Image (tube, rainbow, N blue to C red):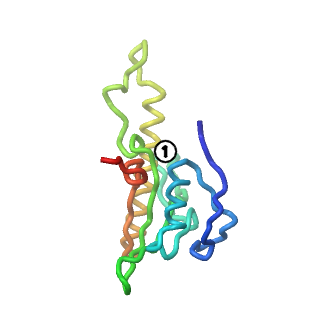
Amino acid sequence: MAYSGKFRPKNPQKYKGDPTKIVWRSLWELKFFRRCDEHPDILEWQSEEIAIPYMNPVKGKTSRYFPDVVVKKRISATEHVMLMIEIKPKKQTRPPDASRKNNTPTGRVSRRYLNEAAAYAVNEAKWKAAQRYCRERNWTFLIFTEDEIQPSKR
């Protein structure tokens, strides 16, 4: 089941963009948006406000990637860092399991494997474009999974 909705910040002055148009597309995004909105060291943040061109390897043409979050985070009284963050389930940050490639009754390559491989190839192309974009601006690109958004309580 997919979840999505509009996010209404408690601190709209921190949001760089139109705070009435913030959309979360997963419960992980919703949780992270709340953290950005409420954390005192997050000075500014935005969601899907930047478009980064990349070569889509599936379509064979240039597409646009809208990173989930860009954050200006305080690291000291006089310093801050800029972070571009993509939020993905951990299973989508790795290539599909090749051992399950021919997991069909006829032994042919499964449609599921092909879809997962295509999605991973597109994500990898987006992330490489984001890394270049960040490197040019002295920003940091990060991929957050459920592990970073909701760390285990050990």
Q: Looking at the rendering, which quadrant does residue 102 occupy?
A: top left
Query: Is residue 28 placed above or below 65 in the rendered structure?
Result: above
As helix, strand or loop, the secondary structure at mark 1 comes to loop
* Residue shown at the point (42%, 53%) measured from the top left: 149
Q: Tell me the quarter of the image containing the N terminus.
A: top right
Left or right of residue 37, residue 89 in this image: left
The x and y percentages for residue 126 are 45, 56
Left or right of residue 37, residue 123 in this image: left
Q: Nearer the viewer, residue 138 or 128?
A: 138
Residue under label 1: 58
The x and y percentages for residue 81 are 39, 75
Which residue lies most toward the top here? 105
* Residue shown at the point (42%, 43%) measured from the top left: 92
Left or right of residue 61, residue 131 in this image: left
Which residue lies most toward the bottom here? 78
Q: Nearer the viewer, residue 131 or 150?
A: 150
* Residue shown at the point (65%, 62%) measured from the top left: 8
* Residue shown at the point (63%, 57%) measured from the top left: 23
Which residue lies most toward the front here? 154
Residue type highlighted by circle 1: Val
Q: Looking at the rendering, which quadrant does residue 131 occupy?
A: bottom left
| Count of all numbered marks drawn on residues in the image | 1
The x and y percentages for residue 130 are 43, 63
Q: Nearer the viewer, residue 83 or 57?
A: 83
Query: Is residue 131 placed above or below 42 in the rendered structure?
Result: above
Q: Looking at the rendering, which quadrant does residue 24 occupy?
A: bottom right
Query: Is residue 115 placed above or below 99 in the rendered structure?
Result: below
Query: Is residue 119 placed above or below 19 in the rendered structure?
Result: above
Q: Residues within 10 Å of mark 1 (few under 14, many from 20)?
A: few
